[in-house]
Amino acid sequence: MSTTQPLPLDGVTVVAVEQAVAAPFATRQLADLGARVIKIERPDGGDFARGYDTAAHGLASHFVWCNRGKESVAIDLKDPRGLDLVRRLVADADVFVQNLAQGAAARLGLDAATLCAAHPRLVAVDISGYGAGGPYAHKRAYDMLVQCEAGLVSVTGTPEQPVKAGVPAADIAAAMYAFSGVLAALLRRAATGRGGPVEISMLDSLAEWMGHPLHHGMHGGTTPARTGLAHAVIAPYDAYRTADGEQLLLSVQNDREWRRLAEQVLERPGLADDPDFATNTARTANRGRTDAVVGDALAGLTGKEALARLDAAGIACARLNTVADVAAHPQLAARDRWREVESPVGPLRALLPPITLPGGAQTPMGAVPALGEHTGATLRALGMTDEQTAALRRDGVISDSALSGGPDQS
């Protein structure tokens, strides 16, 4: 008898009119927890993230990351017949998510307020760049632009050069608040019988993530300076190069740790009580000298030797890994975090989601769908005949061709 536990969202159906990253990453989290996610795409190319690159063996890396485990249904929403099909799908769904350009969903009658008024049990999510109201409501809101508007770029980089985050931080922030918003709304529905609209904006989400520098600036009067890998108010906290060219990041969080670093790693115990270094305030005020002392000591050690000393002394440290290093990280391998997911171009490596469920529940890690791969099966489930779907296909209202060019055979 199997001991595998059901997934938390088994039996939940999600319909998503989504593109790019914010909504697709949110709904992928729902798929990872067992929800059936029906992804509505344009027949003429689908989610435009499909075309960002071809790095994943011919598929786009963003799309592979955000869309495994979903069903792709290609429908033209501009055609009334296509819009009617989506409305029929929504009528049977538990959750609807959209991140169309501001105002587009409302023009189609697919905004959260309209759908929840028609379907009181539905949880409907509107994801936008800047929210439904206010002077920025209709501004374009690509991830980099929102990083700038939210101030993230102003505190990221070196003193000379601000930089954006290397991952789409605004998209990810909005996605994770949409994900948690859906879970909260489903819990409310379980208690009250009613779903309701959920609104998420990328700016709101990333502004929340600006908590430390935002509060430091508002209440302290000064914005934390850009310090590269260093920390604005803690020293030593930076990357230091070893004798064999490796870069190690270390962080001393309190004066007890500084004493251990001085005695066991730097082998200069006198620095523990030196008034220029004994407190974090002094070390930060003398940051240049502090970094020089640490840098000189590590420069005489190999990376392996330095890590051994730092770990033995209980000092927080890390290698400055590359993307390739992460793909081969021993901790991820030891914890069996990698799986293979199917795709139109064959199996692809993918990480298990960070939420590890109790009781043996297995994350499905479903396939990355081809464009329109599930159109035929989904429309047949709605009661449409082969003649009806053939007419819609002929008129370009739907597409059920996989990337291989073959028709849907499900």
Image: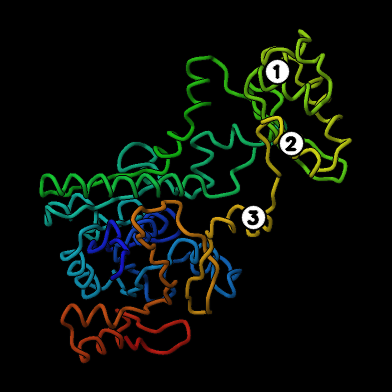
**Residue 284, labelled with which disc?**
1
Along the line of sight, which residue is nearer the eye, 321 or 217? 321
Q: Counting residues from the N terminus, which is met first, the one under dot 1 or under dot 3?
A: 1
Q: Position of residue 192 (x, y in %)?
A: 11, 45
**For residue 309, what is the image quadrant?**
top right
Q: In this figure, which residue is indicated by the disc labeled 2? A: 239
User: Which tag is nearer the camera, tag 2 or tag 3?
Assistant: 3
Along the line of sight, which residue is nearer the eye, 324 or 197? 324
Mark 2 Cα shell of 10 Å, populated few (<14), some (14-19), many (≥20): many
Q: Check the image and report above or below for 278 versus 119.
A: above
Q: Position of residue 359 (x, y in %)?
A: 33, 56
Q: Counting residues from the N terminus, which is met first, the one under dot 2 or under dot 1?
A: 2
User: Whole-Å distance between the Cαs marked 1 and 3?
Assistant: 33 Å
Kind of residue at disc 2:
Ala
Kindly tell me whether residue 100 is visible in this rendering. no
Q: In this figure, which residue is indicated by the disc labeled 3? A: 329
The structure residue drawn at horizontal position 69% and vertical position 13%, both measured from the top left corner, is 279
